[in-house]
Image (cartoon, helix red, strand yellow):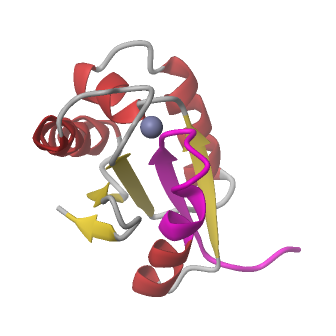
């Protein structure tokens, strides 16, 4: 059986942010693997609580099969899927944390902003 601790990243599909996010989550929370649930501009989708059946389904697999206890919702600089201001992204991410927390009472949910240097900043 494969051992190891998992966390879950709910993130934009943008290829520039996957590795910085996974590395930050692994280091900060001492997990071995990061499941990635990707949709373009996912911070907007989650903040509006719209069309999230696929995201929920994937999240449940990560929580139930991989025993993930941490969900990280992110937004990032220069997002083609959600071209709004940085401040608006940050508001959406914070709202997303509230919405995802309401679905899952047994997991920790945090929001992060990936900036123009691809650094990960917890909100
Ligand atoms: Zn994006």
- Residue 109 x, y percent position in the rendering: 31, 56
Position of 4 relative to 21 (above/below): below
Q: In which quarter of the image is residue 114?
A: bottom left
Residue at image location 48% in from the left, 86% down from the top:
27
Judged left or right of residue 123, residue 29 is right
Residue closest to the far right: 1
Where on the image, by quarter, is ligand 1? top left
20 in magenta = yes
Q: Looking at the image, which is closer to me, 33 or 91?
A: 91
The answer to whether residue 60 of the structure is visible from this angle is no
Boundaries of the magenta span? 1-22
Position of the N terminus by quadrant? bottom right
Judged left or right of residue 93, residue 19 is right
Position of 39 relative to 87 (above/below): above
Residue at image location 57% in from the left, 39% down from the top:
13
- Residue 37 x, y percent position in the rendering: 57, 42
7 in magenta = yes
Position of 20 relative to 101 (above/below): below
Residue at image location 17% in from the left, 35% down from the top:
85
- Residue 16 x, y percent position in the rendering: 55, 54
Q: Quadrant of residue 19?
A: bottom right
Residue at image location 77% in from the left, 79% down from the top:
3
Number of callouts: 0
């Amino acid at each position: 059986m494969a051992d190891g601790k998992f966390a879950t990243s709910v993130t934009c599909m943008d290829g520039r942010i996957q590795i910085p996010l996974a590395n930050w989550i692994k280091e900060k929370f001492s997990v071995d693997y990061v499941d990635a649930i990707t949709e373009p501009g996912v911070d907007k989708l989650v903040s509006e609580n719209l069309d999230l059946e696929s995201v929920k389904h994937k999240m449940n697999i990560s929580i139930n099969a991989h025993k993930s206890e941490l969900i990280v919702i992110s937004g990032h600089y220069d997002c083609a899927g959600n071209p709004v201001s940085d401040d608006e992204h940050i508001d959406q991410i914070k709202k997303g944390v509230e919405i995802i927390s309401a679905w899952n009472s047994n997991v920790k949910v945090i929001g992060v902003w990936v900036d123009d240097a691809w650094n990960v900043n917890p909100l």
